Image (cartoon, coloured by chain):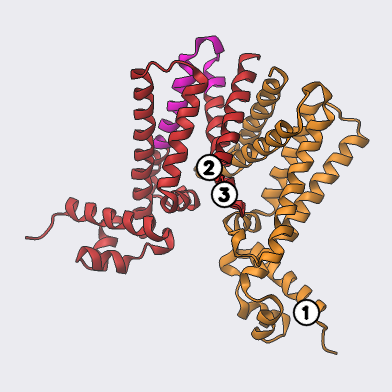
Chain colours: A red, B orange
Amino acid sequence: MALDRDETAERVLAIAEELIAEGGSANLKARTIADRAGIAVGSIYNLFGDLDQVHGRVNMRLLDSLGDAGMRAVMRMQTENITDTRLRLLELSRTYLEFVQANAQAWAALLAFNPRLIQKEAQEAYEKRLDTLLEIIGSVLALDQSLKLDDATRKLSARVLWSSVHGIVINRSTRRQKIRETEDVWLQIDHLVTTFLKGMDHR
Amino acid sequence: MALDRDETAERVLAIAEELIAEGGSANLKARTIADRAGIAVGSIYNLFGDLDQVHGRVNMRLLDSLGDAGMRAVMRMQTENITDTRLRLLELSRTYLEFVQANAQAWAALLAFNPRLIQKEAQEAYEKRLDTLLEIIGSVLALDQSLKLDDATRKLSARVLWSSVHGIVINRSTRRQKIRETEDVWLQIDHLVTTFLKGMDHR
């Protein structure tokens, strides 16, 4: 029985995910996808247009999966009654760090990916996922009434925290020593979150 | 008259710099270097071992050049009697941002480069350059006696600021909109530096 269009697209994306997880975007080849899916190369182009669209879709799933991990962390903290803003931000940072470590190749490929390559209709959906991630951080800041952040400052602070933690996490790879790498990243994240939060408290 | 070994090495590096600046590390090809330098491909391998060593050397020059820009900024601020720590850190951030914008391809290639590929003897020299960059930030923090930072906290803070500004600068490329991009990056850098510094002031 032939697969329908949706099933084939789903299969292509699942294989593309595997390929990127194995060897980054250089490993994403139409020929390999077609062979593994048991379809013609042309079917991939019929379904998605080009490989950039396939990679864009894989990235969206990856962002969804990071968003889900973030949401789960927020819910876990609610259940465990963790209300301290610093601890909440550290927990979100830890979630991000673990996610990047678990999806190293795919995440590096996402960062190297140019979202401007995505078809215009899908770009909004792509950016919406990035916004969702920022909103998770923003919601933690919003819960802390003592910070008295207006809407614009809260959004700006969420973006700064996101980019800063991101910078700390990726910078580790520019160092030769792998020893105590994660502890080292943690020391920096903790110092960033603690000091930044203290600074917001004293605006 | 044949070039001597040092002159040939210098010529290879100058061409490699051009190639990376034009098209990143994918553009760094032994064949192209050899053609442009008027030497045999084998000479490149004789001189450097492999292309990773060539790229490593180009990166070191790039780090030197960023270090020089940072040093010049520090001296300029001394001449202009800029003593406010926040303004000093913002000026260093601006220097970094302008450097990354002026050397976009080469800097992206440096970030994607794995320093572990460099021959062991040269790795120390590579890391020393990264340390020099951190020391420039650290020296600005050290000049501010009111912060009362011990040595370890000052070093940690310099690394966090470096990584955070870096994260903000590179994250801009994940966004579709190019409009007001630099202003947007500035808003984030200013918020980071100002808030982080306030937090250090209130430890």
Secondary-structure class at tag 2: helix
Furthest toward the right, the residue is B79
Residue holding disc 1: B8
Secondary-structure class at tag 1: helix
Q: Residues within 10 Å of mark 3 (few under 14, many from 20)?
A: few
A35 lies left or right of B112: left
Residue holding disc 2: A182
Report the residue at 39% width, 56% height from top: A52
A127 lies left or right of A148: left
Pointer 3 indicates a residue of which chain? A
Residue A125 in the image: above or below residue B27: above
> Residue A127's image quarter?
top left
Q: Nearer the viewer, residue A104 or A63?
A: A104
Q: Residue A179, which numbered label?
A: 3
Report the residue at 33% width, 54% height from top: A17
The amino acid type, in three-letter code, at marker 3 is Ile
First to last magenta residue range: A128-154
The residues bearing labels 2 and 1 have C-alpha atoms spaced at a distance of 42 Å
Residue A147 highlighted magenta (yes or no) = yes
Pointer 2 indicates a residue of which chain? A
Furthest toward the left, the residue is A1
Residue A115 location (% of width, % of height): 45, 48
Pointer 1 indicates a residue of which chain? B
The amino acid type, in three-letter code, at marker 1 is Thr
The amino acid type, in three-letter code, at marker 2 is Thr
